[in-house]
Image: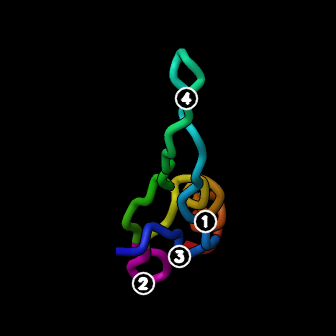
């Protein structure tokens, strides 16, 4: 399953978590994806896009 937003193509970010002794271990921050029906099509959309698209959906309806 792809962890990518269908609207904006945002995907997971990579980085390091640091312990108290400054040892780095890789970490992956995933996008908060939700399944939404937008104009009759089921999509996996990130919460940032849901917030952005909400006023546009109200004016279109």
Q: Residues within 10 Å of mark 1 (few under 14, many from 20)?
A: some
Label 3: which residue? 6
Magenta stretch? Answer: 37-43
Quadrant housing the N terminus: bottom left
Q: What label does residue 41 carry, if any?
A: 2
Q: Which comes before the other along the chain, label 2 or label 1?
A: 1
Quarter of the image where the C terminus is located: bottom right
Image mark for residue 10? 1
Relative to 24, is 41 above or below?
A: below
Identified at 40% across, 60% down, the residue is 34
**Among the two numbered marks 2 and 3 on one chain, the one whose residue lies closer to the N terminus:** 3
Q: Mark 2 or 1, which is nearer the eye?
A: 1
Q: Residue furthest top?
A: 20
Q: CA distance from mark 2 to mark 3?
A: 11 Å
Query: Which numbered disc, 3 or 4, marks the residue that appears first in the sequence?
Result: 3
Which residue is tagged 4? 23
The dot on residue 44 is none
The answer to whether the residue labelled 1 contacts the one labelled 3, judged by CB atoms less than 8 Å apart, is no
Q: Residue 23 at x, y = what percent?
A: 55, 29
Closer-to-camera residue (6/38)? 6
Q: Residues within 10 Å of mark 3 (few under 14, many from 20)?
A: some
Classify mark 1: helix, strand or loop: loop
Total marks in image = 4
Q: CA distance from mark 2 to mark 4?
A: 45 Å
Looking at the rendered image, the disc whose residue lies closer to the viewer, 3 or 4, is: 4
Q: Give the structural element (helix, strand or loop) at label 3.
A: loop
């Amino acid at each position: 399953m792809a962890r990518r937003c269908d609207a904006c193509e945002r995907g997971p970010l990579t980085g390091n978590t640091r312990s108290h002794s400054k040892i780095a271990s890789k970490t992956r921050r995933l996008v908060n994806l939700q399944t939404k029906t937008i104009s009759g099509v089921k999509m996996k959309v990130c919460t940032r896009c849901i917030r952005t698209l909400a006023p546009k959906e109200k004016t279109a309806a």
